[in-house]
Amino acid sequence: MVQGTVQVTHGGSSRWRRRSGEYPTLTAALAVAGDGDVLSIAPGTYRENLVLHHAVTLRGPEDGSGSVRIAPLDGVALTLRASAVVQDLYLEGQDRAAPALLVEDGSPELTDLRVSTHSAAGIEVRGPGARPLVRRCTVENPAGVGIAVLDGGGGVFEECEVVSSGQTGFSVRGGGRPRLERCRIHHSTGAGIAVTGEGSGLEALGCEVYEVRGAGVQIAARAAARLTDCAVHRTSADGVTLDTDAVLTLAGCDIHDIPENAVDLRSRSVLTLSRTSVRRFGRNGLSVWDPGTRVDADSCEIHDSTGDYPAVWVSDGATASLDSCRVHDVPDALFVLDRGSSVDVTDSDLSQVRNTAVSVSDGATAQLDDCRIREAGTGAWFRDHGSGGTLAGCTIDAVQTGVIVTKGADPTLERCTVTSPAEAGFYVSAGGRGTFKACRVTDSSGFGFHVLDGCRTTLTRCHTERCARGGYEFAEDGPVAEECTGDGSGPRPASAAAAAAAAQSAPGGGFTGAQSGVRTVTAARSPVAQPSQAAPAASVPRPADPEPAGDAAGARASGAVLGQLDALVGLDSVKREVRALTDMIEVGRRRQRAGLKAASVRRHLVFTGSPGTGKTTVARLYGEILASLGVLERGHLVEVSRVDLVGEHIGSTAIRTQEAFERARGGVLFIDEAYALAPEDSGRDFGREAIDTLVKLMEDHRDAVVVIVAGYTAEMDRFLTVNPGVASRFSRTIAFGDYGPGELLRIVEQQAEEHEYRLGEGTAEALLTYFTELPKGPAFGNGRTARQTFESMVERHAGRVAQLSEPSTDELTLLFPADLPALSAPC
């Protein structure tokens, strides 16, 4: 066959029909071809727009003699409107407004095609009659969508590959419902798979989505999808997202190496997981938000977090159910918060949790049945008023504290066992309540049950064994204990008031007074006492510290952290101060190694300045620097404010302050708006108690924690005078100046680059003028204002571009002066 010709073999049986013929163009060959005919195309480049109206077979050479390129200068390269067969072709398109291959009708079979194009879409399936079977096809489209199925289209895609798409790799919308089998989607600039709109759906089996500059899988706006035995990994954003009544089922899937949330769902979305693994994620493994949003997980595993966030986060009225699941090697396992939020966990394992396994707060509830918690900082913590739920038949082993109940929380615990806690088995304080039925504590290094602050807790048929400090420690007018027993280990109470409680120490004995309804009490000990006093500080339960950030194996070198500090916009004087302090510490270490005296360097700092000037960011980097120099063990940052330190009644402030200090041990305790601890009209304000406790802790543990207090300049000057020991504890004050217009512009440019936007012609100049004219009152947000300005520009850009039917990449990325928000009134 001649190069560049098309041979048509007719499929008709009439002897009057010509059996074959050769044509110089594909268009000419298609004009004479009918159903069943075969068009054999010689190698070459055909710059034609082909439309198939008949069920013909269109194929390239099978002998490997060369390739067939269909490459028109514009428009759609190949349009199918019949159940044709197309194989071994190379399609190219250059039209940003049209796909390279379009299926509009029929059930064509497309096999071994390579689509390398700069079109709106590589392959587009459009319309309810379009149902192609696509096998072993490769799509590369740096300018647009890889494959799009829309307007009721469908079809089956087998062993296909979508690579380097400029937008979404595989897009389904407008009621499209394709099926994917063993496909690979990678190196897309948008989402790997996106399914959007009511009636839209997708089923994927054995597929892989990876190396995506965006979310791996997005389901939104009442769409539905099912993924079976699929993998999603190495994305730049969330792994899987659901939004606005989306429905997704994940069965036997593997989601891993995700820098953000592995799975995030909101706005009444529903997710069902079974036999799915979620691992190596930077934020939450499961992030569940909003009323009506629900997760049901069965036989799943969530583990190996790479960040400092809870593995499972349920908030704002959402619900989650975990059955036969494992959560391990994470900072926190399960956080449920906000009224209306709830979790139901059955027959599951929570282990190797650095901080808290289960945290319930802000009116949320948790139900745990027959679960196992081990190797955690705190087994379960019910934090505040309205928070509660039930733990039934659970075991908690090798933790710092088994269960904490504080600030009016009121859970019920039945048949729960705490084994080998480092501190208390069950700890109730600060107005916590709680009902404990048939619960046990064994081999505690502290108390079995430690109830203080007059908490109205009820204990029934509880038992303790081998508790080093005693089975039960109660405050006066506190708990009611009935039929509780213990083996009498630990120190026996000395006060007469404690004698009734001591009756439980006889083998098989019980609280005889309590059995008749009398409260049993012992004298409460100070929760902030030093080790030499009656109650060692270790008796105060606290969450386990975060994973060490500054150990020899994991800490970044000081030069790397200082480089990140230097990369911050502005803050020149701050950078000089931090470097000077770092140099002092480093030279001191070298002098010590040389056998010389090292100058004493006080590391506690005062940061002054307006909001949004980078104080928290610099504090976090300062902790990393000290860890890299070996000054701090870990270098992590614990950020608190007045609400975290000041309690509602006498004694609770000292507890809260010590707990915050203990969480920061080995790192930095950053107290924002520290002046709020000493208001000018303080009267009997408990903030002074927090300051006094903090000053003493800084003296007693001077090498364990670096404290940074921050706030407005004038207010911080007053704060330093409220306690004679405050000013002497801080070595220097570092002032953070407001950002100038040029620096605010640089922040917007950084935000744009990070989120893959660009500033169009004249936009930088317009921003500079905008920030120059922007009123800067006391509430001016500095860097925060710059970020908010960028967010406003993105919103206005979206409103503008959403009106375009097929926006180009430039239109999707360029921000123009028209996108700037209007100047607001003076702050």
Image (cartoon, rainbow, N blue to C red):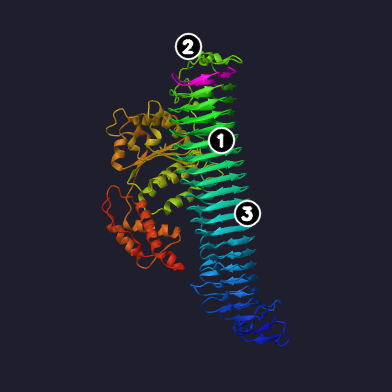
Real-space Cα separation, disc 1 to disc 2, in angstroms = 39 Å
Q: Nearer the viewer, mark 2 or mark 3?
A: 3
Which of marks 3 and 1 precedes in the sequence? 3
- Picture layout, residue 619 above or below residue 201: above
Q: Is residue 701 magenta?
A: no
**Residue 236 appears anywhere in the view:** no
Q: Position of residue 462 (x, y in %)?
A: 56, 22
Quadrant of res 29: bottom right
Left or right of 596, for residue 795: left
Circle 1 sits on which residue? Answer: 368
Return the residue nearer the eye: 38 or 77.
38
What type is the residue that disc 3 sits on? Thr
Q: Position of residue 680 (x, y in %)?
A: 27, 34
Circle 2 sits on which residue? Answer: 496
Q: Secondary structure at mark 2?
A: helix
User: Which span is picked out in magenta?
Assistant: 468-490
Circle 3 sits on which residue? Answer: 228
